[in-house]
């Protein structure tokens, strides 16, 4: 199967790719009215050298089925009927008896990532704006047929559907007069890490290398590889922040960061990629001070002065609109008009201030949560390695609660990374905590 360059739903007229055009129509991506993403039962096969898949229902694992290529040979390796509606939230399956290949434990259903865009070819991908080119969606190299998920998958996460259905047309009945027919789709999964993605470059589209580099860096920039790869720990002098786009991940002087924005005048806002776990809102000022003191001297010398109020102006959640569950969580409030001080609490360079680390305010988050910004989706607001994090804005009068970005899946939005108001200020757990931000000058 090779898609046409400008239409993933149309097979290319090359080789044998178009032979089934009149017999079967493929449906790519996943979309259901009123639903966000399907649930699935994670595989019990935890051995990365064992190529057996989680084949359920009509699916046939080629290895388990000893070459199963028909509709009758048993090659199932997983419970369920293979449809996207079979599993739902809170479902479990106990494999302690070893019914299916893999570990003998009980699994709980998990949810696929929400499709940010419909699957597309790399030709179509190239027409997106740079800030749109990395995200939760599939891109197919139409020269080879290989499909690539357009962002790094965190451990324990599953992509959205590449292929939802194959529907046979009436033409198959006209062709097969007597006997029976079986239509199967052979899927070859070659999961790649950032360290070996170059193995897929030979024979691929000329844009593939830049695309795979962008996935590693979590951002596309104009010069592609002008900065070190995201995992290469490099000194400040190796970076050219002017070429970075919001969302770019990089490692500088022992710390992993995410680029937030170009603030003008050669100033750039960056945030620690992972929250500092086991740290509370109440301890945030001291945690930020300790973290800043431990930074490399070369990085400290770049940090610009800011003025941060302690405590920051409050934005009382029950008086804001645009959030769900009694105004306590969601994407963003409609505005901060009832709280002008909180609305004005936007972090900027202040020559009268102090070079320091700080936490984002609610006003900062609202400014950065845009399609062009570093937080275009719920999921991309979650810290690295699934960490939740505090803002600096209190959400109640007594300062007993504060705004935060949570990592759990919201039942209303079907995604992680939603804004929440009711987290107690003294909460201190291993799931997340303080997420330092600095403004550097280059």
Image (cartoon, rainbow, N blue to C red):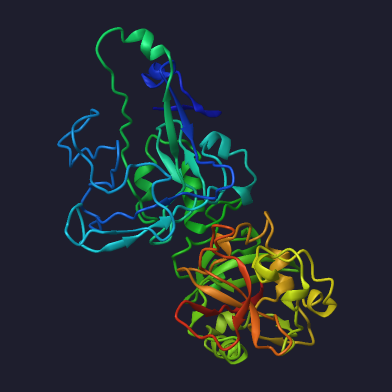
Task: Provide residue 350's location: percent of width, then percent of height.
Answer: 78, 81
Most foreground residue, 354 or 339: 339
Q: Is residue 66 above or below residue 4?
A: below
Residue at x-position 45% and y-position 68%: 385
Q: Is residue 304 left or right of residue 228?
A: right
Give percent across and percent down for residue 397: 74, 87
Rendered image quadrant of residue 426: bottom right
From the viewer's perspective, tell me whether residue 141 is left or right of residue 72. Answer: right
Image height of 436 relative to 152, above or below: below
Quadrant showing the C terminus: bottom right
- Residue 328 visible within the image: yes
For residue 429, side relative to residue 326 (left or right):
left
Q: Quadrant of residue 83?
A: top left
**Residue at (53% x, 47% y) in the render:** 115
In terms of depth relative to the viewer, which is nearer, 335 or 73? 73
Q: Relative to residue 118, is residue 338 drawn left or right?
A: right
Give percent across and percent down for residue 55.
Answer: 28, 43
Quarter of the image with the N terminus is: top left
Residue 346 seen by the camera: no
Image mark count: 0
In the image, 197 versus 27, the foreground residue is 27
Q: x, y (%) of residue 63?
A: 18, 41
Quarter residue 246 falls in: bottom right
Q: Residue at x 44, y 80 (%)?
A: 430
| Looking at the image, residue 150 lies above or below residue 239 | above
């Amino acid at each position: 199967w090779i898609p046409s360059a400008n239409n993933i739903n149309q097979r290319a007229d090359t080789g044998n790719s178009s032979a089934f055009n009149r017999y079967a129509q493929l449906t790519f991506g996943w979309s259901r009215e009123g639903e966000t993403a399907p649930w699935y039962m994670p595989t019990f096969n935890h051995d990365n050298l064992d190529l057996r898949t989680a084949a359920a229902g009509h699916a046939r694992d080629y290895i388990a089925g000893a070459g199963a290529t028909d509709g009758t040979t048993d090659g199932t390796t997983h419970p369920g009927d293979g449809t996207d509606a079979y599993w739902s939230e809170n479902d479990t399956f106990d494999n302690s008896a070893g019914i299916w290949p893999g570990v003998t434990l009980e699994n709980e259903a998990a949810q696929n990532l929400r499709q940010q865009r419909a699957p597309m070819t790399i030709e179509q991908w190239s027409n997106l704006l740079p800030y749109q080119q990395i995200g939760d969606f599939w891109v197919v190299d139409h020269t080879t047929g290989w499909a690539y998920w357009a962002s790094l998958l965190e451990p324990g996460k599953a992509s959205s559907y590449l292929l939802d259905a194959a529907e046979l047309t009436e033409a198959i009945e006209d062709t097969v007069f007597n006997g029976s027919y079986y239509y199967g789709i052979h899927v070859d999964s070659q999961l790649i890490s950032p360290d070996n993605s170059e193995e897929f470059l030979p024979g691929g589209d000329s844009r593939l290398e830049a695309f795979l580099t962008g996935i590693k860096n979590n951002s596309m920039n104009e010069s592609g590889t002008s900065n070190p790869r995201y995992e290469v720990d490099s000194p400040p002098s190796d970076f050219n922040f002017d070429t970075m786009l919001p969302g770019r991940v990089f490692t500088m002087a022992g710390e992993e960061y995410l680029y937030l924005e170009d603030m003008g005048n050669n100033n750039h806002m960056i945030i620690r990629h992972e929250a500092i776990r086991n740290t509370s809102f109440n301890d945030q000022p001291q945690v930020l001070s300790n973290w800043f003191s431990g930074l490399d001297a070369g990085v400290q010398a770049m940090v610009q002065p800011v003025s941060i109020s302690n405590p920051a102006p409050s934005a009382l959640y029950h008086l804001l609109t645009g959030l769900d569950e009694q105004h306590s969580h969601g994407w963003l409030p409609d505005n901060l008009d009832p709280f002008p001080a909180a609305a004005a609490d936007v972090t900027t360079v202040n020559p009268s201030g102090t070079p320091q680390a700080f936490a984002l305010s609610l006003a900062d988050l609202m400014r950065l949560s845009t399609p062009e910004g570093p937080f275009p989706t719920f999921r991309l607001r979650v810290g690295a390695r699934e960490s939740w994090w505090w803002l600096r804005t209190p959400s109640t009068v007594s300062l007993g609660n504060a705004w935060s970005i949570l990592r759990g899946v919201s039942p209303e939005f079907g995604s992680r990374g939603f804004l929440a108001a009711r987290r107690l200020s003294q909460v201190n757990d291993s799931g997340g905590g303080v997420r330092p931000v600095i403004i550097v000058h280059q």
